[in-house]
Image: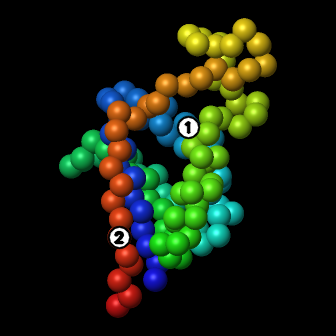
């Protein structure tokens, strides 16, 4: 039975474009995970100010395996060559990536099973 995981991300006003840019830079990072079926990033337009990250998995175990083994890579900084540039906290090494502050101020994980009708 497929499962859906929705990460409801609290994003301060004016920070949505930065969140979207970060997701765009990593949009295929989960594609090869066993049991992964789909991904959507939903931008709020009314009724709620949170962004929703919706993923669908073949089963709960596939999600748990990815959470334990692949999630860190998917949530890493930008891939090589996509650095944030110099700024506060930047390394003295010009080739090093500057650490980035989180965009979100919090998140809630919503979990569902797909009902086969």
Q: Assess disc 2: are there few (<14), some (14-19) or many (≥20) residues with their C-alpha within 10 Å of its C-alpha.
A: few
Number of numbered tags placed on the structure image: 2
Residue 40 or residue 97, whichever sits in front: 97
Q: Is residue 116 above or below residue 82?
A: below
In percent of width and height, residue 69 lies at 62, 56
Q: Is residue 74 visible?
A: yes
In percent of width and height, residue 5 lies at 42, 62
Which residue is painted at 78% across and 19% down in the image? Answer: 95
As measured in the structure, the alpha-carbon distance from the residue carrying label 2 to the one carrying label 1 is 26 Å
Residue 113 appears left or right of 74? left
> Mark 2–mark 1 contact, CB under 8 Å?
no
In percent of width and height, residue 105 lies at 35, 33
The answer to which quarter of the image holds residue 11 is top left
Which residue is painted at 64% across and 70% down in the image? Answer: 34
- Of marks 2 and 1, which one's residue comes earlier in the chain? 1
Residue 109 or residue 20, whichever sits in front: 109
In percent of width and height, residue 9 lies at 37, 44
Q: Assess disc 1: are there few (<14), some (14-19) or many (≥20) residues with their C-alpha within 10 Å of its C-alpha.
A: some
Q: Is residue 91 above or below residue 34?
A: above
The local secondary structure at tag 1 comes to: helix
- The residue pinned by badge 2 equals 112
Checking the image for residue 22, the label placed there is: 1
């Amino acid at each position: 039975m497929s499962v859906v995981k929705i990460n409801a991300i609290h994003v301060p006003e004016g920070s949505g474009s930065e969140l979207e840019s970060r997701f765009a830079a990593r949009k295929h990072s989960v594609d090869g995970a066993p049991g992964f079926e789909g991904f959507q990033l939903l931008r709020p337009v009314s009724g709620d100010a949170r962004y929703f990250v919706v993923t669908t998995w073949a089963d709960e175990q596939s999600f748990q395996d990815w959470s334990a083994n692949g999630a860190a890579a998917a949530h890493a900084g930008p891939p090589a060559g996509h650095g944030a540039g110099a700024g506060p906290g930047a390394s003295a090494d010009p080739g090093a990536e500057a650490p980035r502050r989180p965009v979100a101020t919090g998140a809630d994980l919503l979990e569902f099973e797909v009902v086969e009708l």
